[in-house]
Image: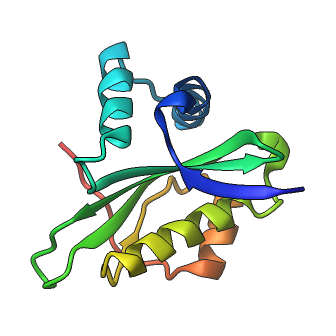
Amino acid sequence: MALDIRPLCAADETDWRRLWTAYLEFYQSSVPEEVYQATFARLIDPERDNQNALLALVDDRPVGLVHYIFHAHNWRLEDVCYLQDLYADPEVRGKGIGRALIEAVYKAADENGAPSVYWMTQDFNHTARKLYDRIATLTPFIKYQR
């Protein structure tokens, strides 16, 4: 299995859309078409270096994605990195795709001087949480939302 992690590009829209749709469906969510279009445009816009996406390819076939955002933090001088979306196709789970994508975000954060990478997941996402428990620290924070 030849695994490659690379930045999203304009030619990836169909594969990105398939992967992100599957991710949203896993979380029983959806977004309107204009959000798909705006999000993809933002992710491939070289002028928007705070909003990023990477694809995982196995034997040149896209099988996973990660979205991450750099932003200011009131408790630090440096920006921090929010890993917003992470997804791997079901047939490649357990083969290191998720870990490779997270490690690529860690590397991007290091290269951009962001000392912290954080993310959230649903409590029922047991399979992913096994990985997260190995490569990150669970915090006691609870999310509230309006």
Using the image as rendered, state which of residue 18 and residue 137 is in the foreground. Answer: 18
Residue placed farthest to the top in the image?
A: 33
Q: Position of residue 9 (x, y in %)?
A: 49, 39
Q: Is residue 90 left or right of residue 5?
A: right
Q: Position of residue 36 (x, y in %)?
A: 39, 24
Q: Position of residue 119 (x, y in %)?
A: 42, 63
Q: Position of residue 43 (x, y in %)?
A: 36, 41
Q: Locate residue 74: give its quadrant.
A: bottom left
Using the image as rendered, state which of residue 60 and residue 97 is in the foreground. Answer: 60
Q: Is residue 144 left or right of residue 62?
A: left
Which quarter of the image is occupied by the C terminus?
A: top left
Q: Locate residue 111: give its quadrant.
A: bottom left
Q: Residue at x 60, y 34 (%)?
A: 19
Q: Residue at x 79, y 52 (%)?
A: 93
Instruction: State whether residue 22 is above or below residue 134.
Output: above
Instruction: State whether residue 36 is above or below residue 103.
Output: above
**How many numbered marks, from 0 up?**
0
Q: How is the image coloured?
A: rainbow
Q: Residue at x 50, y 82 (%)?
A: 137
- The answer to whether residue 89 shows anywhere in this view is no
Q: Is residue 46 left or right of residue 9?
A: left
- The answer to whether residue 113 shows anywhere in this view is yes
Residue placed farthest to the right in the image?
A: 1
Instruction: State whether residue 68 is above or below residue 138.
Output: above
Using the image as rendered, state which of residue 122 and residue 24 is in the foreground. Answer: 24
Which quarter of the image is occupied by the N terminus?
A: bottom right
Q: Residue at x 38, y 52 (%)?
A: 52
